[in-house]
Amino acid sequence: MKNDKAPTMADIARKTGVSPMTVSRAFKSGSMINKDTRDAILKAAEDLGYVFDSTASNLRSQKTDFIAVTIPSINNANFADTVGGLSETLSVHGFQILLGYTNYDTEEEERLIEQLLRRKPQAIVVTGGKHTPRARKLLENANVPVIETWDVPAEPIGHFVGFSNANAVRAMVDHFVAVGYTRIAFIGGDASRDTRGSDRRLGFIAALRDHGLDASRLIHGGVPPISMREGANAMARLLAEYPDTEAVICVSDLSAFGALTECQRRGVAVPGRIAIGGFGDYEIGGISVPALTTINARARQIGERTGQLILDLLQDRQDVSDITIEPELIVRESSR
Amino acid sequence: MKNDKAPTMADIARKTGVSPMTVSRAFKSGSMINKDTRDAILKAAEDLGYVFDSTASNLRSQKTDFIAVTIPSINNANFADTVGGLSETLSVHGFQILLGYTNYDTEEEERLIEQLLRRKPQAIVVTGGKHTPRARKLLENANVPVIETWDVPAEPIGHFVGFSNANAVRAMVDHFVAVGYTRIAFIGGDASRDTRGSDRRLGFIAALRDHGLDASRLIHGGVPPISMREGANAMARLLAEYPDTEAVICVSDLSAFGALTECQRRGVAVPGRIAIGGFGDYEIGGISVPALTTINARARQIGERTGQLILDLLQDRQDVSDITIEPELIVRESSR
DNA sequence: ATGAAAGCGCTAACAG
DNA sequence: CTGTTAGCGCTTTCAT
């Protein structure tokens, strides 16, 4: 491994007898350049082991082709799907995702946004519509498109692609009530931390009240994200504290599955003795026995449409609008 | 939102009556600068809404603080854990992960590596020890540390942090044989695509042969990654094609869980009628009923130790060595 | 502790 | 289709 300085476009120019500018054109698709000249340049580049230097290109052209994205956790199939949809939509246009994890913490999100903006992304996508005041200000001043996702923000910073978490849970409550359950509980996490989880909990309470039902069966599962294990532990507490509960809605399919396993270990029939609902339509909910009633938030579609929105915005299209996704209630064996 | 040009260090310098160089020092920790001067500069920066421009800094200083990482899929808890460990270890030192997904395809990996190297990362981490010849050459010429993970490469490019997938599966075969099973099957994916999955399959075959057992019960689950659903389908085929099978090892816990649910739907007792083993120690294997025997590949530790290795290498420490991780066999209810 | 000059490697803008 | 010139915003280097 030799350690001489890496070859530059100037080296290629010298070797091929053209100007550096022509070399630059050879690497940029869609530029007017003689085919033979380009071929000679690309061959020389290959021979020299040249690697294009984005850092210089970024500075001069004032564009990085980075799209900054913050998600609560890398280890979550829903957010992974959103990033996947975003990434696939944007990568064919030469953009690269710059990803950061907030760990469900708006303070951490603020730090992350500041970090990411220094990299001069051409757009920034954040998860959720609640941010620290400073984070909000950073985003407002960023002078690039800002897209909030997975939520319908009270006051959008720029654009948003999301849905109402509260309304989504309301749809499930309506289903449970329609089936005939009245003593319904909720398993969720620390309300102040996971803003989407918190919205689901609030939606649950509001919906039960609208049905004239008691909304006090709230089980705290732990610090978000609530794991399968925490879902199981929460179910154990629910059965102890409110033994006559007929149905429970969990903040995610993962905690719902954990809750289900706790019932299985105790010989509590699902849905015979207690019905269970989840959130997110994770793969596990479709295949577990019994399969889980859930809400498909269309995670991948959120990513795809966010990507398309960014492409439109970067092309100065004026006819772009915010996008409200319609989550789908999926009724399965666990609630019938 | 005003659209004037973003303020630069020169603007701050003008406003504070110092030189741009002093402004630069104010933003760099550990530089000799008068405390009052720094405070004035930082205040002016805040007032102007200044955002540090990494692109310019990167070019001039020839360091980006990027660490490039390729993983097969973003939607996999094992790789997510590795990236999490890596990210946490490195971010406190100011590094940022530049992540790409190969979709379990070495051709895609090659494209991705080329893309990532243009961003001038200060190290590159790849998953697996098998690459296209061109990808290999790109990595060899990159002039930055290269770390292969999740494998023990036949010919390491630079360093590696991993384990032998074949040996890990062998340990599980030994366990199954010790418990008394002799008719053992394997559920995996397309051998040519997922090189780690392929190594597991080969390890399975070799281990069975060493025990003098038949190694022909190989069920093809589909294109990697094998989903829970595909695991269930594969189990259905296994029960049809080799009805006397006593135990099955699956390429991951996800396919193993799918296989388990198929047994539950058919009333096939696990482990009474058929034992099941997985791979990866995903959360689900620890909580499902029955819990799944599996192998913990210490995904997070792979990330943490890779991060530490990179820190050592970037400080020119000479006493760094490759790291072989010891996966742990975890015996649970599904195989006893 | 601070400043002046130069330049990282590429490409926008203009000329031919 | 190709070349020339200048400069993106920062930091290295050398002075003071």
Image (cartoon, coloured by chain):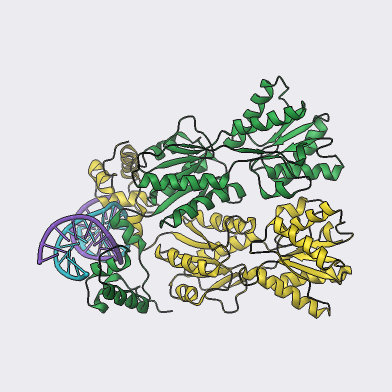
Chain colours: A yellow, B green, C cyan, D purple
Residue B96 as seen in the image, left or right of residue A300? left
Picture layout, residue B184 above or below residue B31: above
The location of residue A124, given as percent across then percent down, is: 49, 66
Residue A11 as seen in the image, left or right of residue B328? left
In depth, the one of A4 and B206 nearer the eye is: B206
Quarter holding the N terminus of chain A is top left
Camera sees residue A233 = yes
Looking at this rendering, what residue extends furthest in the front direction?
Answer: A240
In depth, the one of B326 and A275 nearer the eye is: B326
Picture layout, residue B169 above or below residue B70: above
| The quadrant where residue B329 appears | top right
In depth, the one of A176 and B164 nearer the eye is: B164
Camera sees residue B76 = no
Picture layout, residue A255 above or below residue A149: above
Q: Residue at x 74, y 59 (%)?
A: A233
Quarter holding the C terminus of chain A is bottom right
Looking at this rendering, what residue extends furthest in the top direction?
Answer: B212
The location of residue A288, given as percent across then percent down, is: 78, 51
| The quadrant where residue B141 appears | top left
Q: Residue at x 42, y 55 (%)?
A: B95
Residue A91 as seen in the image, left or right of residue B141? right
Q: Residue at x 57, y 71 (%)?
A: A160
The location of residue A247, given as percent across then percent down, is: 83, 65
Count of numbered labels shown in the rendering: 0
The location of residue B106, given as percent across then percent down, is: 52, 39
